[in-house]
Image (cartoon, rainbow, N blue to C red):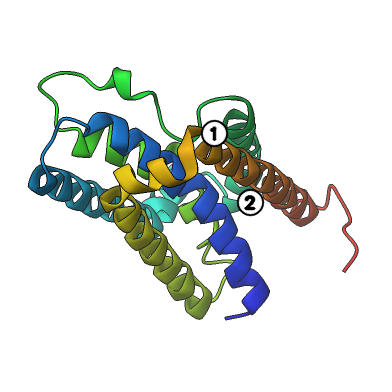
Amino acid sequence: MHADHLIKDALILWATIDPVGTLAIFAGLTARLDQKARFRTALKATLYSAIILISAVLVGQLLLSAMGIRLISLQVAGGIILFLFGLKMIFGNGAGEDPSHAEEGHDIAVFPLAVPSIASPGAIMAAIVLTDNHTHPISDQVGTVMVICLILGITFLFMLAAAPVIRLIGNNGASILIRVMGMLLAALSIELVFEGLNLFNLLQLPS
């Protein structure tokens, strides 16, 4: 697997999964839970997210083929969506939703932690586009899945350390990190759109 491909995938997936934003959301949602309950919630949220994202890698393209949607079209659409997602991170509240949106009687590990915070629409879209069978060999796809698992593992550790990390960097520090990742995601998403347009022969990119 080429290092530049791995780095690009890692940046896109880090920005869309957004461990820092998830950390802040987790801290707010679990403030009244004891340590064991926080651990169980973090573990379940991570496992649910892994199932969702890996399922997107395995069957996402099959579903698109069944609906007659080409991966090139998804790449362009995904790039646009990821660009808007990046803008939301820059000007909004990050990848996840506000903790107050959690509904009573629901498992917070499922909503809003696993969906839409960790396995966000942007992360699902990125997982499908970055493992396109037509443009990425199996070795690259396996590498991308490993990156997904690694970032989910980091997200799990972030959630376990939510309270001390928030105290260390503060809300302002977390906000700055989220916005920097949003800028990187916006730039990378434009590259996805340009690559898609190039495959459509609508745009000639220099080699």
For the point 33% across and 62% down, the residue is 153
Q: Amino acid at mark 2?
A: Ile
Earlier-in-chain disc, 2 versus 1: 2
Residue at numbered disc 1:
172
**Element at badge 2?**
helix
Q: Residues within 10 Å of mark 1 (few under 14, many from 20)?
A: few
Q: Secondary structure at mark 1?
A: helix
Q: Residue at x 87, y 58 (%)?
A: 205
Query: What amino acid is labelled 1 in the image?
Result: Asn
Name above or below for residue 7 compared with residue 111. below
| Residue 159 locus on image (x, y percent) | 30, 48
**Quarter occupied by the C terminus:** bottom right
Q: Residues within 10 Å of mark 2 (few under 14, many from 20)?
A: many
Which of 175 and 14 lies nearest the eye of the viewer? Answer: 175
Q: Please state which of residues 38 and 124 is positioned toward the viewer in this rendering.
A: 38
Q: What is the quadrant of the N terminus in the image? A: bottom right
In the rendered image of this protein, does residue 117 appear above or below residue 71?
A: above
Q: Is residue 53 left or right of residue 89?
A: left
Pointers 2 and 1 in contact (C-beta within 8 Å): no
* Residue labelled with disc 2: 72
Say how many tags the image has: 2
The percent position of residue 148, horizontal first and vertical second, equals 41, 61
